Image (cartoon, helix red, strand yellow):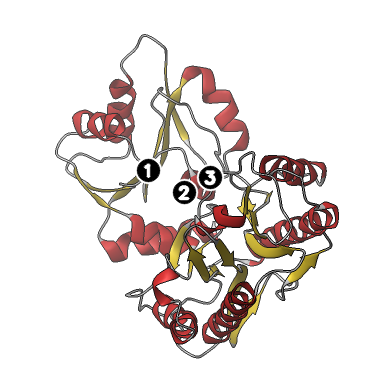
Amino acid sequence: MQRHERLFTEMERAGFDALAIVPGANAAYLTGIDFTTRLRLSMVLVSRRGAALIVPAMEARRAAAVATLPLQGFPWADGADPRQALRAAGDALGLRGARVGIEPTVMRVFELHALEAAIDGITCADATGTLMALRSAKDADELAAMREAVAIIESTLQQVLAELAPGQTERAIAERWDALIRAAGSIPAFETAVAAGAHGASPHHTSGDRALQRGDLVVLDGGAVVRGYVSDITRTVAIGPVDDEARAVYAAVEQANLAGRQAAALPGASGDSVDRAARAVIDAAGYGPAFLHRTGHGIGREIHEPPFIVAGSTAPLPVGATFTVEPGVYLAGRFGVRIEDDLVRTADGAVSLTSFPRGLITVDA
């Protein structure tokens, strides 16, 4: 109920009469309903007068079983027009002519068109800021889940590294890591990525059939999910000895990671200030153009969510915000290095949720 009262406060601040939430992270956060219905229309309408669930009839019982707030049901049957259920829900909540907040990066076009056609005179506007004002600051239960997710990803990464050897393929290593995550009672938070040698120069490489070779730097990026909340870690390891420039790049990225984490603990820290601190180290080392992405992103129910650790994100990081610091250098045709940690902003600074060693680990080859 505290979460919902905060929601109404933020809605009033933004001038919304209601929110229209479709299946996804926000629906799970606000209602406990954490499943999709693909091409069948589902939506939750939330206002001070109550909350209405528009859902395919075949899903009504499942939704009711997991809902964490009272929802007035408006099921619709296959072969019927879901706009009729939407219209009835809108009438029940008195939404004619209302200003309704929507999720423009999540809501699909057919859902928006149905909403606008079903409820007379509504005006739809972006409610991303309103919703993220709630989700950015994690409570104790959310942080506990994320700490468990960190523990799983770090323990399984340790197992993976203990087994690394030349001749293993990227795909086999990624599949082994996934299997260990599942064996620990979790699921992968995203497509686990292993990038060896020159493949490491692509920040979002898809694990393939390249085999590890002596002299490779290997970038490993994985995450786990606990009670709907994620972890996200990247470490770069060496397969046997690597050359002087690889060691120099690694040292620069390791120092940039430290600078970013230290900046996150300063009074008034913002995504912009953390990004500038990490980027300054890599610029000074002469690799600025090879730092191809923002320094980090928020994590929680989604693997990428606000706040973003990037230039121009000048709002102070709120207490309870969870985010990554993950500077990297990517040299096309040669190798890449990234070191990623998960942090939480606290009342007196910032704490790293991840503690896996950040120095260069060398696997005997």
Q: Is 197 or 175 nearer to us in this picture?
A: 197
Q: Which numbered disc, 1 or 3, marks the residue closer to the eye?
A: 1
Q: Say which label, 1 or 3, has the lower sequence index.
A: 3
Residue 355 in the figure: left or right of residue 41: right
Q: Tell me the quarter of the image containing the N terminus.
A: bottom right
Return the residue at label 2: 26
Foreground of the two, 99 or 334:
334
Residue depicted at 57% across the width and 86% down the height? 262
User: Hey, what amino acid is under mark 1?
Assistant: Val
Q: With respect to residue 75, does 184 lie above or below?
A: below
Q: Looking at the image, can residue 6 be seen?
A: no
Dot 3: element: helix
Q: Where in the figure is residue 365, as x and y percent of width and height?
A: 82, 59
Q: Please give the name of the residue rendered at 80% of the width and 45% of the height, measured from the top-left corner.
A: 180
Q: Amino acid at mark 2?
A: Asn
Residue beneath label 3, please?
A: 28
